[in-house]
Image (spheres, coloured by chain):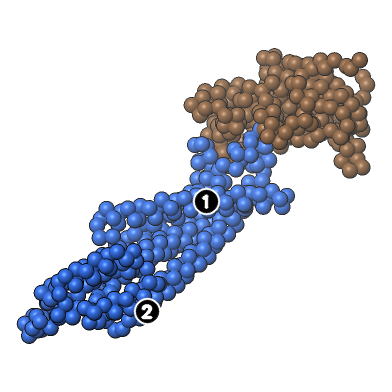
Amino acid sequence: MNIHIKTAWDYIRRSPFQALAASFVLTLTFFVMTLVSVLVYSSSKLITYFETRPQVIAFLKSDAKDTEVADLQHSLSTDPHIKDIKYVSKEEALSIYKKATSDNPLLGQLVDPSIFPASLEFSVTDLSFAQSIIDNVKGEKIVDSVGFTAALGGETSLNDVVGRLKTVTTYVRVGGIVFVTLLFITSLVVLLVITSMRVVGRREEVEILNLIGATKGFIRSPIILEAFIYTLFGVILGWAVSFIAILYLAPTVVSYFGEIPVLPKTAIGIIELFGMIFVIEIFVGAVLALSGSLLAISRVKKAR
Amino acid sequence: MPEPETGIIHFKGVTKKFGQLVALGGISFDVKKGEFIFITGPSGAGKTTILKLILGELTPDIGQVKVDGFNVAGLDEKDLPRFRQQIGTVFQDFKLLPERTVFENVAVALAVIGLPEKDWDERVKHVLKLAGLTNQTDLFPSQLSGGELQRVSLARALSVNPKIILADEPTGNLDWETSDKLMELFEKINKEGKTIVMATHNMEIVKKYKKRVINIVGGTIEKP
């Protein structure tokens, strides 16, 4: 193996500009791949956040009895499409309001607690059932009105919000995947061209090695190793630059999205996420190196 | 009753054509183990074709070539490398790797046969000493004379401890004095038991070293 690594390294040293071209394209590919992976992760977290947090608020009439509230709560808990049911009393509602207006305490002092109705908050496991559930809840005699936590603008507004988010994330994912695929193909072509040039340039050497009894594997090994060196370099550098960029932007992003966990909040979480991306990219890089070099070798063989 | 195969190399009724040209026309001969033979003849007689048939680079159109018991034409593509590892070849144009040193050119043959790297140093130094190239180990082919290049080629052939050494016009590009020194080396190797088949049109060498001669004329063996 050492002789093959040395041979591959000698080829790289003798053709530094080819090596630079290959390394640059591969670094760019894996840089973008890392960014797209993080975008896909963040968008998934965004969707999950809006799908799972208390979405529906059923505001209760002021004369609703505790037993009636308990009955309704129990009835909702038996519905398989509903989860995380929570009763919010008037006092708790006031507390939430005060917290939301903590930057302007005067607003909190001017408000009478009695204006805040008690409510039942719950999440819908699938937004396709949301409308029927809302209609049922609205029909309950102790329910005054029904609203959404995401936007209190109307019955369809949460569907709109989540729908819009899903559309945006789909575009981001599809666009990201298309872009990464294009870069992957470009990298493959670059590797193919450089490897083909290497094989053609080694014709005399290959003839000599054949005559002294070298196997196909022996002859091909340095070429394949060279491709692996390029992709490994590209993976490490591309991943590292992305990692640093995202770490730099993380505080801004996290503070913008607030409680929405678009990025892991702990250091271990970040390391796990980027560690997983790195391992996947190493695998993708290995596939790229192997397929590019073997394709080039077979093409040159056919051409002869 | 079929003829017994008596040699380490056995040609039986071998014909090789290149298009309309008959390079070899039904030749038969044996080379015994440990023998040193010359294959002589004018340019284009078929000398190199015989060596290529032994090495498996070419296959006969008619007839059979057997080397150390193996029917060369019947070897699979995956068996051919292992077969060639048992044959050391010295080429007229040296066929050295220009971007590797003398040491590395010999060592690559050891890497090809799968010898562990820790054993390369001893083996390479031994064959380079035998070839009189102890002081040239770190030089590149471009820094060597014709005689030195041929000796590197021979050292590489010897390093794998082959049963047979094929030499295709090894003195073709050398002056008489250098040729003579090289031939002394071949003689020494042969005395150690290696079978040597040398194609040459250098009749002075043939006359001096008095080995069995297979003279090829027009693709057939000329009777003595």
Q: Nearer the viewer, mark 1 or mark 2?
A: 2
Q: Which residue in the structure is indicated by mark 2? A: A160
Q: Chain of mark 2?
A: A
Along the line of sight, the residue nearer the viewer: B216 or A166: A166
Q: Which residue in the structure is indicated by mark 1? A: A287
As drawn, A208 above or below A46: above
Q: Is residue A290 left or right of residue B81?
A: left
Q: Does residue B204 appear in the picture of this structure?
A: no
The percent coordinates of residue A244 (x first, y second) are 32, 60
Q: Chain of mark 1?
A: A
Q: Is residue A163 left or right of residue B173?
A: left
Q: Secondary structure at mark 2?
A: helix
Tell me the colour chain B is drawn in. brown
Along the line of sight, the residue nearer the viewer: A29 or A98: A98
Q: Earlier in the sequence, mark 1 or mark 2?
A: 2
- Alpha carbons under labels 1 and 2: distance apart: 41 Å
Res. B218 image quadrant: top right
Q: Residue at x 28, y 60 (%)?
A: A264
Q: Residues within 10 Å of mark 1 (few under 14, many from 20)?
A: few
Along the line of sight, the residue nearer the viewer: A25 or B142: A25
The percent coordinates of residue A42 (x first, y second) are 35, 65
Res. B34 image quadrant: top right
As drawn, B15 above or below A207: above
The percent coordinates of residue B223 (x first, y second) are 93, 21
